[in-house]
Image (spheres, rainbow, N blue to C red):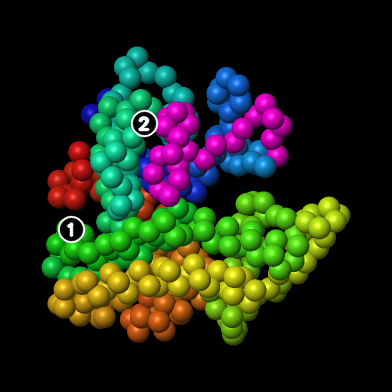
Amino acid sequence: MALFRQELAIDLGTANTVIFKDDQVVLDEPSIIAVETKSGKLMALGHVAQQMEEHTPPKISTIRPLMNGVIADYDAAEQMLTGFIRKAIGKKKTIFSPSLKTLIGIPGGSTPVDMRSIRDSASHAGAHEVVMVYEPMASALGIGLDVTAPNGNMIVDIGGGTSEIAVISLGGIVESASIHVAGNEITNDIIDYMSQQHNIHVGRTTAEQIKFNVGSVLVDLGDQAVEPYRVKGRNILTGLPLEADITYQEIASCIDKTVDKIESEILRVLQRTPPELYSNIVVNGIWLAGGGSLLRGIAERFTKKVNIPFHVAEDPLKAVARGTCLALKEPNYPFLMK
């Protein structure tokens, strides 16, 4: 039967796309493509396209098809999905073309229009059957929680475009919030900070490197403190080269307001949570997933703010993808949207 059917679990993220096939990661690449500006012809995608970002001549453009977790450029999204699916499946030719089923993780705040765009893009990319699951539910599955049990669990998935916050019990999402405050906004904070405080103009790639090397939400990391990261760029005032050593304390200060927005939304969801489920969450703790959960000190800061233990999931970047992979094996889950 497997000869005539292939199944892919897809985490279609604003920053990265991860695809599982047969319980293995077959693709993990940035959600970006490079096209010929005039014709729109696909030139590159994924890692290759990311290397071209901010380095392209006028005849080539780089496009990130997703914004805030949903499709912003339909044609580019279709090109990207088609390319990624072909990469994931491989180029082996057979007499019969096997049917393709895809299970795609989508943001909790997706509208029917958003869902239709994702479904249509996947169908045009070659999927014969498209099933969707909300990302918080997929994260919970990927972390290893029993989402069908009569027990309250809370997930905070901080991705590139959205932060997904959800309370889950009995195979359903009881309370949730999906806010457009996540990794991209933190990156923008860093770009603005470098410009205002150091007079250095940096692009998104450099800002991401700063976030990776000295990203922190605490001004005192104690034994986990990291060395300053040297940044080279253009002086905004003179146009000459300029260097600056950026500390994790600086980054913690410059992204503080953005992290505070996520904290505030977590508290609002908790305030709406039924008492019995709230009690479960106090015992079980709150799970963090997504790239934002890798910021240094984030679990400690949230724990202090909310007074409930926070835990960072193992390999949090792939929590949604692992969850969609597990959901493929249980097609009767009540939360799957066909």
Label placed on residue 121: 2
Helix, strand or loop at mark 2: helix
In percent of width and height, residue 4 lies at 27, 25
The answer to which of 72 and 147 lies nearer the viewer is 72
215 sits to left or right of 110: right
Image location (x, y in percent) of residue 156:
36, 65
Q: Hey, which quadrant is residue 284 in on the image?
A: bottom left
Which amino acid does the dot numbered 1 rest on? Answer: Gly
Residue at image coords 30%, 24%: 98
Residue 172's disc number: 1
Task: Single out the residue that lies furthest toward the top.
Answer: 95
| Residue 181 visible, this orientation | yes
Write the start and end of the magenta stretch as one range: 55-79
State how far apart marks 2 and 1 are (Cα): 26 Å
The reply to whether residue 2 is visible in this rendering is no
Residue occupying image coordinates x 59% and y 75%: 253
Between 230 and 305, the residue placed more toward the observer is 305
Position of residue 139 in the picture relative to residue 314 (left or right): left
Q: Residues within 10 Å of mark 2 (few under 14, many from 20)?
A: many
Residue lying furthest front: 237
| Magenta stretch: includes residue 142 | no
